[in-house]
Image (cartoon, helix red, strand yellow):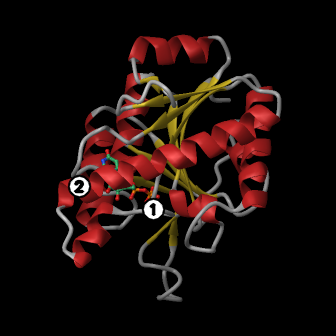
């Protein structure tokens, strides 16, 4: 069983198929799963995305400055983090939001040692505002935070049940990898995470499990040591 994990939740996951906003029922289901993982004695850090509200790259189409758009994207992750914190606290857990962009009235500033202390005290920590820098993604933030908190594994919960040779929604002949290396992801140009996130994990020996969060209980099963989805090894 893993003792400390970094869970990456995309913004789209919170929208639960609606594409925009936060699904009120689904966010409570996620919180319930996080409570179940916590009950196993696992320390949990979460990086939450913001694509359900705003994506920097997409906004360039409306002729916005990329840096300004990325600032909006990072702020949208804070909205998700606060919603998730509220849902987690409703399950009776202690939870802290730490933001990479300082906003003291809303969240604690991200300080690595404090984050680790929260985890040691069995508080769930949600890392908001990505890396705090434009031109990055929350996948890169997840890789970075996983390394900083010395997580045993990065858990990437998605809408697909693993990594495939091609997009299984478009190509019915696509096959799933049980295990794959980061080098092979880069070589095959598979769209699992952006390349900076992939190379960060590869260069720092951080394993990752990519699995579907559509079925309730999957996060708990993965934390308990079951191999669901695809395991990525350095
Ligand atoms: N973002 C950023 N720097 C970061 C993380 C995120 O500028 O370190 C911005 C970027 O515009 C991105 C948006 O925040 O499009 C939302 O994050 P992301 O697209 O990774 O969210 P997800 O796809 O996981 O919902």
Which numbered dot is residue 68?
2
> Element under label 1?
loop
- The number of numbered badges drawn on the structure is 2
Instruction: Determine whether, in the image, residue 120 is placed left or right of residue 86.
Output: left
Q: Nearer the viewer, residue 203 or 31?
A: 31
Q: Is residue 34 visible?
A: no
Q: In which quadrant is the C terminus drawn?
A: top left
Q: Nearer the viewer, residue 73 or 174?
A: 73
Q: Residues within 10 Å of mark 2 (few under 14, many from 20)?
A: few
Q: Quadrant of ligand 1?
A: bottom left
At horizontal 40% and vertical 41% (from top left) the residue drawn is 129
Spatial separation of the CA atoms under disc 1 and disc 2: 15 Å
Which numbered dot is residue 34?
none
Instruction: Determine whether, in the image, residue 160 is placed left or right of residue 144.
Output: right
At horizontal 59% and vertical 57% (from top left) the residue drawn is 211
Look at mark 1 in the image and give the residue it sits on.
51
Instruction: Determine whether, in the image, residue 125 is placed left or right of residue 181.
Output: right
Establish if 127 lies above or below 158. above
User: Measured from the top left, where is residue 19 in percent x and y?
Assistant: 56, 73
Instruction: Determine whether, in the image, residue 230 is placed left or right of residue 71.
Output: right
Establish if 137 lies above or below 4. below
User: Measured from the top left, where is residue 133 in percent x and y?
Assistant: 24, 41
């Amino acid at each position: 069983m893993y003792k400390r994990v970094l869970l990456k939740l995309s913004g789209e996951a919170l929208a639960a198929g609606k594409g925009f906003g936060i699904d009120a029922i689904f966010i409570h289901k996620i919180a319930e799963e996080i409570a179940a993982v916590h009950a196993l004695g696992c320390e949990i850090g979460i990086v939450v995305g913001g694509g359900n509200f705003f994506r920097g790259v997409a906004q360039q189409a409306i002729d916005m400055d990329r840096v300004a758009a990325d600032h909006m994207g990072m702020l949208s992750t804070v909205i998700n983090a606060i919603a998730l914190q509220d849902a987690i606290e409703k399950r009776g857990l202690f939870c802290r939001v730490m933001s990479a962009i300082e906003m003291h009235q809303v969240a604690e500033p991200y300080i690595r040692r404090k984050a680790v202390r929260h985890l040691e005290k069995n508080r769930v920590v949600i890392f908001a505002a990505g890396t705090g820098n434009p031109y990055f993604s929350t996948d890169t933030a997840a890789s970075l935070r996983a390394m900083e908190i010395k997580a045993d594994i990065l858990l990437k919960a998605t809408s697909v049940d693993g990594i495939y040779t091609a997009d299984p929604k478009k190509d019915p002949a696509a096959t799933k990898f049980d295990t794959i290396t980061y080098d092979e992801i880069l070589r095959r140009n598979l769209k699992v995470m952006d390349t900076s996130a992939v190379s960060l994990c590869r260069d720092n020996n951080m394993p990752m499990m990519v699995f579907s969060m559509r079925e309730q209980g999957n996060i708990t099963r993965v934390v308990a040591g079951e191999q669901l989805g695809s395991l990525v090894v350095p």
